[in-house]
Amino acid sequence: MAGEIPDLEAFVRTGTGKGAARQARRDGMVPGIVFGGDVDPLPINLDFNKLLTKLRAGRFRATLFNMKVEGHDDVRVICRDVQRHVVKDLPTHVDFMRLKRTTKINLFIQVEVSGEEDCPGLRKGGVLTLVRPEVELVVTAGDIPDHITVDISGLQIGDSATIANVVLPEGSKPVIDRDFVIAQVSAPSGLASQDDEDEDVAANEVPATEVKED
């Protein structure tokens, strides 16, 4: 059930304080810290270019990573803060938190669609729109789903599937505390335009009133 967790390579940072951090940056590294998990904090360095690539890909602070540090056991971590240069907006320090398998975290989970072949709305020429390709859920670190599935097999043209229609993994729940649309089946653009024109014509067709002269 759990999806593949991306690796994040880091290196033990020798020395602490501003001097060691400045040296790390001169060496093309970004200093950071790993804390939590009932063990001592671990000062680390991360490759600047690799980190920047992951940051620009998005969802960095909502992604669970498998951190690999030579001489240490792999550990699941999530980013808790990224400090940036005030002018260049480039990362200067990163904080990570170790996670236990029972820890609850917020993650964006991919949405997959099922039932397209049986969907009566699509059979009639409707168009499927995936309103939310990802949904942010509160999940357990030890049991992260790689996707959730929305079934559209019963949707007619004009119908929507909401989060209430999705069977969520045990222990997971949406971050948004209300029902919201995930997918919908709409009329084809040509048909929708024709319906609008028909409504306009109907509104303008006022029946003539017969006037009788005395």
Image (spheres, helix red, strand yellow):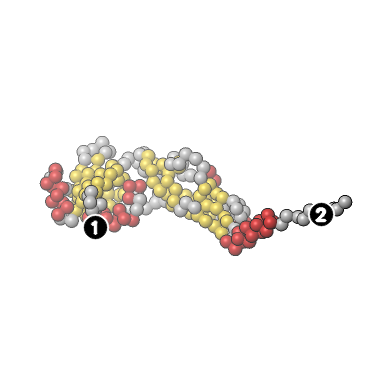
Residue at the image point whose x is 23% and y is 48% from the top: 86
Residue furthest front in the image: 214
Mark number displayed over residue 49 = 1
Quarter of image, res 206: bottom right
Residue 18 lies left or right of residue 173; in this view the side is left
Counting from the top left corner in percent of width and height, residue 12 is at 18, 48
Residue 117 lies left or right of residue 65; in this view the side is right
Element assignment for label 1: helix
Of callouts 1 and 2, the N-terminal one = 1
Residue furthest top in the image: 38
Quarter of image, res 141: top left
Please tell me which residue lies in front, 113 or 48. Answer: 48
Residue at the image point whose x is 33% and y is 47% from the top: 61
Mark number displayed over residue 28 = none
Q: Which residue is mark 2?
A: 210
Residue type at the position of mark 1 = Asn
Counting from the top left corner in percent of width and height, residue 83 is at 24, 46
